[in-house]
Structure formats: C-alpha cells, structure tokens
Amino acid sequence: MADAPKPISDEDRPKSKRIGALAALWPFVAPYKRMMIAAGFALVLTAVISLILPIAVRRVVDSFDLESSLLLDRYFAAALVIAGLLAVGTALRYYLVTRLGERVVADIRTATFDRMIGMSPEFFEKIMTGEVLSRITTDTTLILSVIGSSVSVALRNVLILIGGLALMFFTSAKLTGLVLLLVPLVIVPIVVMGRRLRTLSRENQDWIAQSSGNASEALLSVQAVQSFTHEAKSRAKFWDMTEKSFVSARKRIGTRAVMTAIVIFLIFAGVVGVLWIGANDVRSGVMSVGQLVQFLIYSVMVAGGVGALTEVWGELQRAAGATERLVELLEADDTVVDPVSPAAAPDLRRGQIDFDNVVFHYPARPSVAALNGISLHVAPGETIALVGPSGAGKTTIIQLLLRFYDPTSGVIRLDGIDLRDLNRADFRRHMAVVPQDPVIFGDTARENIRFGRPDATDAEVEAAAKAAAAHDFLTALPDGYDSYVGERGVMLSGGQKQRIAIARAILRDAPVLLLDEATSALDAESERAVQQAVEGLAKGRTTLIVAHRLATVKKADRILVFEAGKIVAQGTHDQLVAEGGLYARLARLQFTEGLAAE
C-alpha cells in the first residue's frame, strides 16, 4: 500500500515573488476591462472630490467674517453637493470593484477545479486533496479581499496621497517641506517589517492548508478512526496543526500591529509638530485660519492614506502568497497528458486490447516493478480474468488501460492505436468500470446510477438496476430510487454500493467492460444474480475481470495468472487446474474451503 500523500511543505514551494506574484491574476481580470475602466473612473472621481472638499471647507471658514450671508450659504451648499457626489461615487466604486472581485475569484476557482479534476492519480500522491480544497477556498478568499477591496483602497489612497501632498504644497510649501522630512522615517519600518510579515503570512496559510488536509482525511475515514479508537490521536494531531497555524497567525498579527503602531505614531507626531509651526504662522499673519484648516485636513488625509497603505500592504502580501499557491496548481506538471494532435477516435470501438512488453513502476515505489514485461492480446468480445495474490499487478492492468498512469516502457493499444496518441476522454467513453471500492456520490440512488450515462431515461436506469440485482433494495428505500444515499453512500451497505456501481456500468453500455473485484462485497445470492447479469453484459464486449474469488471467473474465455508483476500461466479454468501451479493451489484452497463451509 502506498504511503499517504504528504502536504507540500514551504521548502518544497518556490520562493515568494513578493507583490509581483499578483501579476498572475491579470489573465483572469483582463476579460473584464470595461468593468475595470468604470471602477477606475469611479475611483478617480471619489479621490478628486475628496481632495476638493478641504478647499470648500477653507472657503467656508474664511467666509465667517463676511457680511454677505448669501455667499456663505453658497459655500455651504457647494460643500453639500460635493459630499453628495462623494457618496454616490463611493457607492458606485464599491459596487463595481466588489462585483469584479467576485467574478474574477469565481473564474479562478473554476479554472483551478477544471485543472485539478483532470490531473492523474500520480499528482494526488504528492498533495492531499484537503490542501487542494484549502487553496481553492481559503486562498481564493484572500484574493477576493484584494481584488474586491484592497486594490481599490490602495489606488484610492495613492491618489489621495499624491494629490494631498500636491495641494499641501500649494497651501503652504514651508509646512509641506517639513512633512516630507518625515517620509523616510515612515518608509523604513514598512520595508523592513514588511519582509517579515510576508514570510509569516505564507507560513500561516501553509499551516491552514495542512490542517484542512488532515481534517479532510480524518473525516472521510471517520469509521476507521472510531473503530480503532483513534479519536484522541486524531484530535491531538488536528489541534497541533491548528495551534501551529494560530501561533503563526499571532506572530503575523503582532508584527503587523507593531508596524502599524510605529508608522501611525511617526506620522501623527510629525503632523502635530508641523501644525504647531502652522499655528504660529497664523498668529503672525503669514497664513489664514482657513488655509491652516485646509492644510490640516490634507495632512490628516495624507496620514490616513499612508496608514491605510500599510494595512493594505500586508493584505497584498498575503494575497501574493495565496496567488503563488494557486498558480502552483494551475501550472502543475502532469505526467499523463493528452497529445497535441490526437489520433482520430472512431465512434464505435471493437474493443481489441494489446499490451506490448509493458513495464511499470508506481511513482511512490520506483524501485519495485508493479508490471514486469507484460505482453497481452485481448481479442474483441473476449472475456479475460486476471487472478493472483494481492499486489501481483492485476489492478495495475486496469489503471494503465484507463491511462491513469503511463507505462514506464512498452506500449498499450486499443484497437491498434497507442493510448498515448488518443485523447483520454475519447477512449474512456468506450469503457465501463466497476472498481473494488465503488464511488457513491452524495445524491439520490437514481442519479448515482445515471452517472454512467447522464442522458439515460428513468426507465433505462431502472432496467440497469434490475440487471444488477439492485431494484428490490432500491424500491424498498423510503423514497425509492429518489432516496438520498448520503455522502460516499454512507446510508448503504457495501453490497448495495457495489450493485449500484454495477448498474452504473451496465447503463454505460460500453464495448469494454472492466470489473475490479466487482462482486467482492456481495452475499452468495446477490453474487449469483449479478454474475448472471455480468455474463449477459459481457456478451459481445471485451471484458477484463479482476478477481480473488475464482468461482466468479470459471466461465471466462481465458484466465491469466499474475505473480510478482508477471503472467506466470494462462488458460481456461480446467486447463490451469490440470497444469498444477499457483492457480491450482489457489483453486484447491478456495473450493475445498467452500465445500467444508457447506
């Protein structure tokens, strides 16, 4: 049994590309240029209005001593109109930017899932599905906060910062010069502590992903966990990972809090000092009260902009790390890929299968050959049984035939065409599979059977269920075929799951039928009924049957005996029993035990 896949550690990932990693989001944002332009217009509008507002305030303040109340009223009315435009522009910016963020993140999630659902099993030997799900959910949520909020806030505050400084200089060049002397003091802690913050953010996300992967694995195997009284250890392991995630988050939060405190203190201490000088200028008549108020408002706006940018900087760094992790999935290499120029796939297949000197090593066990020089010809319509001890290579034949993996050497052909020259979807649609561990989805029984052929009618679904000896137990369920069977079919017994999987394969009506221990979970009566259905289904189809129970393969056209990745014997049941050897020994053990049990 292969070792469980381990979460990708931080050391296994490429180094952070800093904020530049966010450029990888551009292909997802680019299709919505009109929305971006509209959002940009609203953003610039609100920034400009915000910068105009202090000028209106200055006019009002300096007009307090005017004798004309009409002029004063106009200044107040103008200020009110500006505030209204600011409110409308801000609402419009929020709507457009948030909508853009939701749309882009939905596209990223879809693209990531589309990529992952087509990856070969080898890929999932290297990464836990829980971590993949964490990236699709948690990491995209971070990106949503950036596209839907942080980028907009950052751009707005950059405009406020630049425009505010320019208008501060226009209001008082002397005071502005004093303010600019404080800029280096603010930038240094942002740069130095920002690097630490980026590392901690990435570490925090890694621990979240690993704890998610661990929880997913434990919950999907909850019966095994409880059967072996492993709850305490599972809780302890999850707690340990969650606690490490919390400790990492605490360090990140602490670093960010310290950086924010330092920056805000430096900014406002400097502003207070500059305003003290400005107050003296007002007293000496160098500037008016309105000018000082205008400068004060711009100073607060600029200081607020710098403070907001420090907040946003941390969010951008976290999103940059999340983007890198998603890009890893989107750009992940797969050893099994479709050809650039695939061979034409005919609509009808004869079902001829050829293995030509095939050698295969599982990536997790590169030193052990799962198949060692297998050459095999299966004629169209022939029923072949694969028997032998566990680990002999029987199921590997099925996996290679479905092209979940490519052989290390040798060629596998379907109707004379190398599988590597065909699109996987083109030849897999001609195959029906019943795995040893049937996959049941959290849906109704009817839809689980219809999974084999989505366009099948209800009558065809029920006919397949009858052929698989599943009709009786399905009609006995509370809602019959429309009964919900639970996640992974938790509401069904092992034999019931197996019969639904067989019904699914019968419904698919494919020219190649692959049965991997298809009757292993059935009782004797159900097995006999299903065996008769399989025999009927196999007529005119190329059928490969993997079985440990030899009673299910006695009628096969040919039986191949596997041992240590090689075919050590082949023939009919009677021929192999007469020859002696491994098959005869297995037959003697099984049939003798069966007679003794009777």
Image: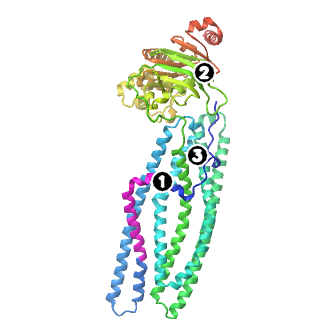
Looking at the picture, tell me which residue is in the foreground, 487 or 87: 87
Contact (Cβ within 8 Å) of mark 2 with mark 1: no
Estimate the x, y position of residue 473 in percent, counting from the top left: 45, 24
Query: Mark on residue 212?
Result: 3
Taking the spot 60% from the left edge, 56% from the top edge, the residue there is 201
Q: Is residue 36 magenta?
A: yes
Q: Are marks 3 and 1 in contact (CB under 8 Å)?
A: no
Q: Label 1, secondary structure: give it.
A: helix
Image-based side of 585 in relation to 145, left or right: right
Q: Is residue 234 above or below residue 276?
A: above
Q: Write down the quadrant of residue 549 in the picture.
A: top right
Q: Quadrant of the C terminus?
A: top right
Q: Which mark is residue 373?
A: 2
Q: Which mark is residue 545?
A: none
Query: Does 344 sit left or right of 146 as displayed?
Result: left
* One can see residue 406 in this view: yes
Q: In this figure, which residue is indicated by the disc labeled 1? A: 25
Q: CA distance from mark 3 to mark 1?
A: 24 Å
Q: SS for tag 2? A: strand
Whether residue 319 is visible: no
Which residue is rendered at x = 48% and y = 90% of the image?
287
Left or right: 530 in relation to 210: left
Distance (Cα) linking label 2 and label 1: 47 Å
Name the image quarter holding the N terminus. top right
